[in-house]
Amino acid sequence: MHPVLYADLTLCLVLVVCAQSPSCPSLCTCVFHDRSNSKGLRTVLCKNPALTAIPIDLPCDTVKFRLERTSVSRIFRGTFSAMPELLYLWLTYNSITILHPRSFTNLSSLHELRLDGNLLSTFPWEGLRDVPRLRTLGLHNNRLARIPPLAARYLGNVTYLDLSSNRISTLPNDLTALWPLSDATQSQRSVVLGLQDNPWVCDCRLSTLLDISKAPESSLVLLDRFLTCSEPPDLAGVPFQSVELTRCRRPYAVTSATKITALLGSNVLLRCDATGYPTPTIMWIKSARPNLYNQDAHESPRVGIRWSAVSLNGISYRDAGEYRCRAQNMAGISEAIVSLNVVGIMAEYANSKNSGKQQTVEKSDYSQKRPKQNSSLLPRNMTGKPYLPKRVIKIPKASRDKMKRDRTAVQNLPRKHFLIASENPLHKRQTPHVSMSILT
């Protein structure tokens, strides 16, 4: 069965039981107010170690419910919804570790909620939306380690808040700003705050609280005005009234440029400046990848100023993207973004591509683009016919020797004589026409 449907059915069952059986639950005692019959308003007290769950047959006319020193460890959704007239809810010194955020549904009239002496390490602050008339909230002697800033949204009408004897070391400034404490003329009520017996760290996060508590006309009343610091070591044991603290300032980060376009293989320097108190720390994060970048962080001689630089040498396309400069201190976080765009062609890729293209061209020229011989440009012999390149023919050694002797004989002739073989009329029919020129 769906949990929400189960809770609604449980609530309906509780209402029916309440209407039909207004008697006091077992293991509990009831005290009537102003009347002695069963129709009067009453206080219900459940104080038995054997009780492990809150009774479901609680009377509808209960105005005060006390659950003390039992073995109850969890408060479920809508546990008290059958008591719409409830004004006081005390769940003190039990073993409660978990409170459902909707534990207080249908308790719009509730004025006082006490959870002292339990084992709560967290509290569902958003659950206070169901109790808009709440004035008193007691969380004394639990295990709370921190109060989130969102708690300030739901404590606007609370005039008594007891956080003593927990493990709280600081309070968010938003929490102290929810009450008009600094101007007593505008505030028509006093706010009582219990903070004693906590390990307070006296830094800028407590500055607002200390300033308000020291104001001569402040409407803030501390249950224990002799609060002392536990940390830092130089302030351990020092009373709040003697401590001077600087206000926290959220960091502000800014980069030297928001967009950078760089050539492939070049060097790029990214710089970020941040201000804030305490002096913020700086971290560089590349978007789309969870890696952090080595950085050189420098702190200015002036408190609260820091700058950082990241050096990218021989950048590649993988270095392109958004780089976030994150500045952080105890007051908050600030980010500035610089976008890096890389342009150019990789040298190795270009060389290999050009080399491949050159080889392709050479091969093509060799196989397909042989130079064509133009007969009009070839040298011509004495007959006017084009002179064609000689073919290489292997000649026997004896023939080569004879040709050499003939060439020598020709060279020894006078330069003005030329040997020309012409037509012989005697052998016109037997011998074809032959023309030859010998150049000397």
Image (spheres, grey):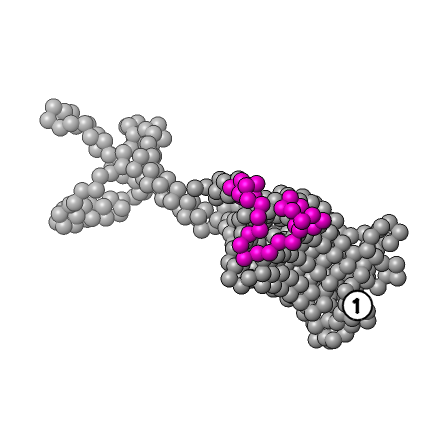
Point 54% across, 41% down: residue? 20
* Residue 365: quadrant of the picture: top left
* Residue 166: quadrant of the picture: bottom right
Q: Is residue 155 above or below residue 370?
A: below
Q: Quadrant of the C terminus?
A: top left
Magenta-drawn stretch contains 339 = no
Point 53% across, 49% down: residue? 56
Q: Position of residue 175 (x, y in %)?
A: 72, 55
Foreground residue, 408 or 416?
Answer: 408
Magenta-drawn stretch contains 18 = yes
Q: Which residues are magenta?
A: 13-42
Q: Quadrant of the N terminus?
A: top left
Point 27% across, 34% down: residue? 388
In the figure, is residue 64 to the left or right of 350? Answer: right
Foreground residue, 211 or 307?
Answer: 211
Residue located farthest toward the top when viewing the structure as drawn: 429
Query: Tag 1: residue type?
Result: Arg
Residue position for label 1: 225
Q: Is residue 104 above or below residue 228?
A: above
Q: Position of residue 332 (x, y in %)?
A: 68, 56
